[in-house]
């Protein structure tokens, strides 16, 4: 009999199934809900909750009348606010970052307006390639108000920036405003993301704010169109 740890059963099953999925090729069929229920000695409702989470996260997909299958390497982002590092860990992938550039500079008019500082005020600019399982997923450039992050230039920016902001500076991005547009990548962007020039991509601009709605970051991210999508629910009024 399978032993279930003292955590909610659907969370335990979700983690267990994610481990199983890692060893399967894309489009491999999963057992039926009944078989999973029997195998792991849990209820059908527990199985459904675990599968619903895996489906929402993009780890599996369903075909009506055919069953449930392992998804390919497409990363689905929901509208919940979370870091790239957290997103990848939740999907059973190993996140990493390659630091391309980091400097201090005057905010300028556009970044100054976005962050609520004067044009001459200093910001820290960080440009990184973000990877999952050593594959480039996106190209990210972040501007942060310099006065908020003294010493940030000495930090290890191959790690989660949100985690560094939280632990070192007690800065937490609690809300963000985002604009998503479709773009074709330039030659330089294509080389960094390991895709052909002019490939389709998602351009996401985010202004992250703290609990008082004070801007902390202005971030522009270019996501590979072949490996990333955005999922959200809409409701009819």
Image (cartoon, grey):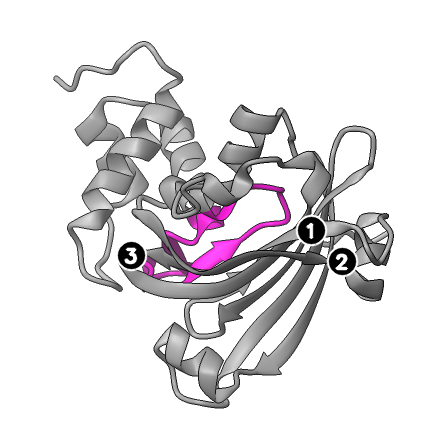
Residue 76, image x, y percentages: 48, 56
55 vs 38, left or right, is right
Dot 1, crowdedness within 10 Å: few (<14), some or many (≥20)? many
From the viewer's perspective, is residue 74 above or below residue 85? below
**Residue at image coords 21%, 26%:** 40
Give the residue at mark 3: 70
The image quadrant that residue 17 belongs to is top left
Q: Position of residue 57 (x, y in %)?
A: 45, 48
CA distance for labels 3 and 2: 45 Å
Q: Secondary structure at mark 3?
A: strand
Q: Do callouts 1 and 3 mark residues in contact (Cβ within 8 Å)?
A: no
Which is more N-terminal, label 2 or label 3? 3
Residue range corresponding to the magenta coloring: 55-84
Q: Is residue 52 in sight in this rendering?
A: no
What secondary structure is found at the residue carrying circle 1?
strand
Residue 53 in the image, given as x and y percentages of width and height = 45, 40
Task: Give the residue pinned by disc 2.
Answer: 107
Disc on res. 234: none
In front: 187, or 151? 151
**Alpha carbon distance from label 1 to label 2:** 6 Å
| SS of the residue under disc 2 | loop
Q: Nearer the viewer, residue 170 or 42?
A: 170
**As drawn, 171 above or below 106:** above
Residue farthest to the left, as pictured: 1
Q: Earlier in the sequence, mark 1 or mark 3?
A: 3
Crowd around label 3: few <14 · some 14–19 · many ≥20 (10 Å): many
Residue plotted at (30% across, 47% down): 94
């Amino acid at each position: 009999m399978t032993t279930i740890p003292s955590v909610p059963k659907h969370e335990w099953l979700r983690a267990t199934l994610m481990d199983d999925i890692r060893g399967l090729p894309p489009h491999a069929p999963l057992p039926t809900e009944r078989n999973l229920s029997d195998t792991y000695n849990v209820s059908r409702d527990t199985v459904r909750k675990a599968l619903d989470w895996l489906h929402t996260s993009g780890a599996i997909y369903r075909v009506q009348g055919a069953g449930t299958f392992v998804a390919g390497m497409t990363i689905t982002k929901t509208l919940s606010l979370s870091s790239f590092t957290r997103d990848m860990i939740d999907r059973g992938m190993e996140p990493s970052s390659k630091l391309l550039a980091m400097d201090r500079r005057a905010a300028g008019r556009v970044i100054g307006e976005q962050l609520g500082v004067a044009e001459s005020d200093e910001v820290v600019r960080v440009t990184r390639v973000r990877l999952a399982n050593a594959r480039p997923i996106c190209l990210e450039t972040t501007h942060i108000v310099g006065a908020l992050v003294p010493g940030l230039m000495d930090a290890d920016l191959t790690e989660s920036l949100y985690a560094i902001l939280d632990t070192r500076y007690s800065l937490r991005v609690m809300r963000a405003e985002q604009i998503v547009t479709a773009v074709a990548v330039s030659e330089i962007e294509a080389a960094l993301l390991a895709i052909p020039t002019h490939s389709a991509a998602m351009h996401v601009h985010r202004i992250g704010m703290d609990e008082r709605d004070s801007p902390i970051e202005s971030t522009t991210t270019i996501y590979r169109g072949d490996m990333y999508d955005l999922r959200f629910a809409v409701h009819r009024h």
